[in-house]
Amino acid sequence: MNLTLLQEKKLAPIWEKKEPITKQSLKLNGKPGGKRKRETTNFNLAFLFTNIIGALAKAILIVAFFYAVFSGYRFITHTPYFDINKINTTGIKYLSNEKLNTWAGPLIGKNIFQLDLGKFSKKLATHPWIHTASVRRVFPQGINIKIKERIPFARIKLDKIHIMDNYGILLGPETSNLTKLPLITGIKAKNSIPGNNVADEEIIRGLKAMHNLNLLHMFKKNPIESMHIKSKSRIIFLTKNKNIRVYMRPGMIQESLKNLILVIDTIEKNEPNLKYIDLSFKNKVVISNQKKLKKINKT
């Protein structure tokens, strides 16, 4: 019994001592741990290699795409298939195609894709006769140009006689087909370059008054066709036959027209040889024929 106890007491420490040694030997010779490290390293290298291959493939695709785009652009901008050989222009009445082409520059033979439509439209719109312009491509070789011309409204005498539109823009020198337009004289504008605006308040009022006078029956057969701005306080209108004058003040045009309408029947019936009508006075119309002068008060 004592021997058994003694043996148990001696075996326990020995086992306790051997156990750490066995664990230590396992740690030192731990091949499974080393094997895991190699497997992790191999896995990381494979993943990195795959990423590099993928990135290279994407880079090659991007380069190929841009090269294809560049090659396509060079083809469509250099092939004769897209060279302009037809120009269709609409909306021109006073301008000729020759003058328009001279102003805009040559288009025939240019590549249709290299034409800057916005820039070209703006270039056209700078012409004095052109109010607006729009341009569009007609594939494969055509260009459509749509023009809205300015409307010639009157002739105006500056250094020479020019054509003016209804906004007061100078369009250019007088032409033979526009000699019947109303003539404005007495203007002292210095800058007579086509494209400039020369209309002041007196001109605008005077042209409106001329238009309203020509609507009256008494001027139907002998319309007023010229206007002379003598001063800022006096405008003289002259009929086509140069036999009747009408005087007005720029600031009293509406009142003067109303006064004339009230007595126009009397004038037409009793004054066959009318020389002038003076509407410069308030509530009064002064008329004169070849022999006498009359004053007609507004009723």
Image: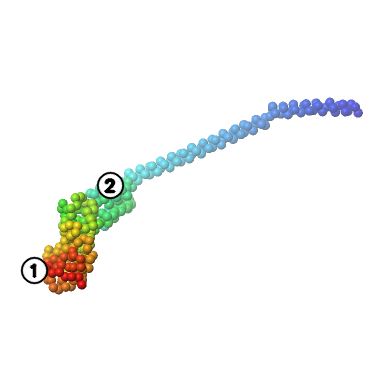
- Tag 1: residue type? Lys
- Tag 2: residue type? Gly
Give the residue furthest to the right. Answer: 1
Instruction: Please tell me which residue is depicted at 54% across the width and 35% down the height of the picture.
Output: 49
Q: Position of residue 228 (x, y in %)?
A: 16, 59
Closest to the observer, 118 or 227: 227
Residue hosting label 2? 109
- Looking at the image, do the residues carrying marks 1 and 2 touch, with CB atoms under 8 Å apart? no
Whether residue 86 is situated above or below residue 279 in the rendered picture: above
Q: Position of residue 89 (x, y in %)?
A: 27, 55
Q: Position of residue 287 (x, y in %)?
A: 14, 68
- For label 2, the crowd category at 10 Å Cα-Cα, with few meaning under 14, some 14 to 19 and many 20 or more, is few
Can residue 227 be seen at all in this image of the molecule? Answer: no
Closest to the observer, 179 or 91: 179
Query: Mark 1 or mark 2, which is nearer to you?
Result: 1
Whether residue 73 is situated above or below residue 248 in the rendered picture: above
Residue hosting label 1? 291
Can residue 282 be seen at all in this image of the molecule? Answer: yes
| Quarter residue 1 falls in | top right
Label 1: element kind: loop
| Quarter residue 170 falls in | bottom left
